[in-house]
Image: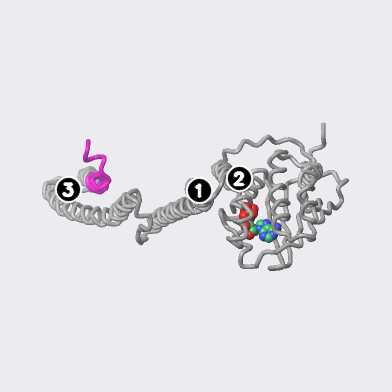
Amino acid sequence: MGLWRQLRWRIVAAQMLVVVVGVITLITTADALAVRSVEPALLADFQSAVVQALVVAALMATVAGLATSLLLMREILRPLREIARSSQRIAAGHYDERVVLPASDELAAMAASFNQMAAALEQVEQQRVTLIGNVAHELRTPLAGLEGYLEGLLDGVLTNDPETLSTMQHEVRRLRRLVDDLQTLSRVEAGQVQLHFERVDLAGVVQRVVAQLRPQVLARCLEFELENPDVVLPVYADDDRTAQILLNLIGNAICYTPDSGCITVRVATADGNAQVVVQDTGIGIPAEALPYIFERFYRVDQSRARSSGGSGIGLTIARYLAWAMGGEITATSAGLGNGSTFTLTLPLDQIPES
Ligand code: ADP
């Protein structure tokens, strides 16, 4: 029973079955034909000649069957064994392991799929290592700041006056924001964010967010323009999450636009979609950085963004949320010093309201 489960013995058995069926068929047909068409006097000689020929043919067929079984086994079993060995190496942490593509099409397709899976695993592993490194790096900065202040207080170099305490509180808030952002990021990446879809007026959400951020804009002597605020743009989306995306996009525009610059927010429709365009006259984004700004922890100017408290994952979260609602966020910029434009696109809800 154990032998029967092995592919090699099944191949041998299949070949031998062909030999046995051939021999039995030949014996029975030769016998039937001989009785009908061979003279009775010659019948015994004829039958013995047939048996001799059959024995030789059966021997030759068995040898040929065993030889082809051997070739087939080498062709099929070797790649399978190699894939099994490679998967064990991958399981042991060697993510760069790949198998050589065998000659036959079907096995080559299987080996190619295996290599693809190994490459995907390697990429995930690389991302995991990078993520841990980034998180450690992001946590180190505020922690080092706090440690410095605490040491200063203990040594008596600093006094616990409101200014020192408020700087320490600022660092703690940065840590808290980073941890909150990381938690949200892990949830959106795992697709675990609960979205409450409903018919939402996108222009209304824009107005709400603009009103919320207006004090910051005024404090920074920036100008805010809200174009065509009266338009109604029904989308089927999560109200709070849409506001969260807009808070990030408009918040970034405020953060990266020097005083007395201008931020324009425009709502429009295009190709059956609703769009919010957030345009600023700020520091802009160099062309070579544009493809990366949605990646986790990516900041165009590390020092500037970190000092402003940015964790570099706001846009990553925003894009995941937009995707989860069937939308997209894109960014354009004419380069450093020439401002940036971020566009949030969400599918219009075209079902008439009941
Ligand atoms: P952060 O919290 O650092 O702002 P984000 O993920 O929101 O992180 O943005 C990533 C990076 O993209 C920022 O650090 C900044 O370099 C760049 N960026 C985002 N929005 C703008 C903008 N409106 N103008 C210029 N640069 C921007």
What number is the disc on residue 156? 1
Mark before the other along the chain sequence, 1 or 2: 1
**Main SS of the magenta segment?**
helix
Mark before the other along the chain sequence, 3 or 1: 3
What number is the disc on residue 39? 3
Residues drawn in magenta? 1-22
Task: Tell me the distance, in whole angstroms, between the alpha carbons under discs 3 and 2.
Answer: 127 Å
Quadrant of the rendered structure where residue 334 is? Answer: bottom right
Q: Mark 1 falls on what kind of element?
A: loop
Q: Mark 2 falls on what kind of element?
A: loop
User: Closer to the camera: disc 3 or disc 1?
Assistant: 1
Task: Tell me the distance, in whole angstroms, between the alpha carbons under discs 3 and 1.
Answer: 127 Å
7 within the magenta span: yes
Q: Is residue 286 left or right of residue 132?
A: right
17 within the magenta span: yes
Visual colour scheme: one colour
Q: Which residue is mark 2?
A: 161
Give residue 58's position: percent from left, percent from top: 18, 51
What number is the disc on residue 118? none
| Crowding at mark 3 (Cα within 10 Å: few <14, some 14-19, many 20+) | few
